[in-house]
Amino acid sequence: MIILGIETSCDETAIGILEAKKTKAGFFIKPLSNVVSSQIKIHKKYGGVVPMLASREHTKNIPFVLKKSLRQTFGSEKEFSKIDLIAVTKGPGLILSLLIGVNFAKTLAWAWEKPIMGVNHLEGHLFSFLLPEKNKSHKLSINDYEKIFPAICLLVSGGHTQLIHIKKFGDYKIIGETRDDAAGECFDKGARILDLEYPGGPNIAKIAEQVKTIQKISKLQDISLPRPMIHTKDYDFSFSGLKTALLYLTQEINFSNKKKKLTPMLAFELQEAITDVLVEKTLKAAQEFKTKSIILAGGVSANLRLRQKFENRLKERDLNIKLLTPLLEYTTDNAIMIALAGFFQYVYNPRKIWDWKKLEAMANLRL
Ligand code: KG4
Ligand code: ZN
């Protein structure tokens, strides 16, 4: 079947078209187009996403994103008859942004006479590790699919930091989450303190690369940040204190007069602190729940240091747990992951197919 995915939960206007099929042998997954129109340039000057501006941009861009997506897939923007299902993010997210995508999808469903499905944005992130590059296909046998579960997913984005125990598609339990700021938010706010541009995560990661070894930083004992809640018995996180600790540290070491020298080291230490906590708690959960794999998802899962630390620790501790990571292009918000989650919902829970009249955006939707 051919699924058209639509995503507008935050500041990316995205439409993707996916070919997917389930046979007795397993799953066939092939992204046909993945168009993402990013609004970063617009929000950059405010240091974060401005909801009213995001909504206005989605409204302006979404018809063009659809045209491009149809043209890339079928060679013509008028060719929508081959689409079997529309899958749209219904939540969670910024309500003014969600409403644009949901109402656009409902209008298409009505005009094209297609079934429509509301997808949880987080469920889209959870399964993005299964997506191959555009126009390449991925065949996953039932046997291999079953070897993935039970899994622990570390979902880390600008709005979420959650550890989710997944028994199978649709069977999720959030075993821990952040009590305040999300990990991505900590990268973004930390970047602001260091005078780096929004979005902070990729900029922190890039500048931290200048510090080549951990030994170098350990010599600078005064550059040290806490690892909040790393040893607590639960699976919760807390990152707001880390941002405050960074702010105090910059004042103590007179950062404003030595920016050039200190920025890479502070960025490095912030990245070390955030990733240490994420890795430790996830490994603890995976061992305690005896999972077969660890799935990384969300914008922060693009962080290469995070991936490297997971690989190192799994090897050092000789743990027989598979690390499953999405391709970098699918870590941040996109609509192909929404189409895939819509497809799985169709396979496992077809009753969830909605009539467009019943679909509503829900800003606080939970997994
Ligand atoms: O999943 P996403 O695109 O949007 C949300 O649903 O929030 O995640 C965006 C977040 C931002 O906070 C951004 O700074 C962070 O992901 N991010 C990164 C990296 N790339 C994006 N954080 C750390 N390292 C990266 N390489
Ligand atoms: Zn997201």
Image (cartoon, rainbow, N blue to C red):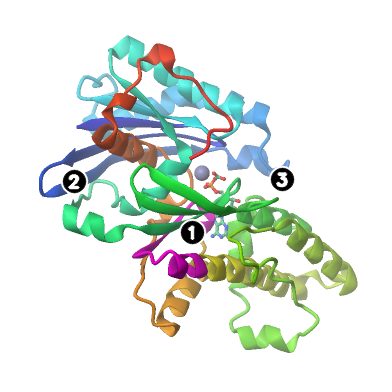
Amino acid type assigned to the residue bearing label 1 in the image: Ala
Residue 346 belongs to the span the image colors magenta: no
Q: Which mark is on residue 302?
A: 1
Q: Which residue is mark 3?
A: 47
Q: Which mark is on residue 28?
A: 2
Q: From the top left corner, tell me how far across and down residue 306 is, in percent.
A: 52, 68
Amino acid type assigned to the residue bearing label 2 in the image: Phe
Front one among 127 and 258: 127
Work out whether 209 lies above or below 295: below
Q: Quadrant of residue 324?
A: bottom left
Ligand 1 lies under 8 Å from the Cβ of mark 1: yes
Identify the secondary structure beneath mark 3: loop
Residue at point 59%, 71% (across, down)? 276
Over which residues does the magenta segment extend?
283-302
Identify the secondary structure beneath mark 2: strand
Identify the secondary structure beneath mark 1: helix
Q: From the top left corner, tell me how far across and down residue 213 is, in percent.
A: 59, 84
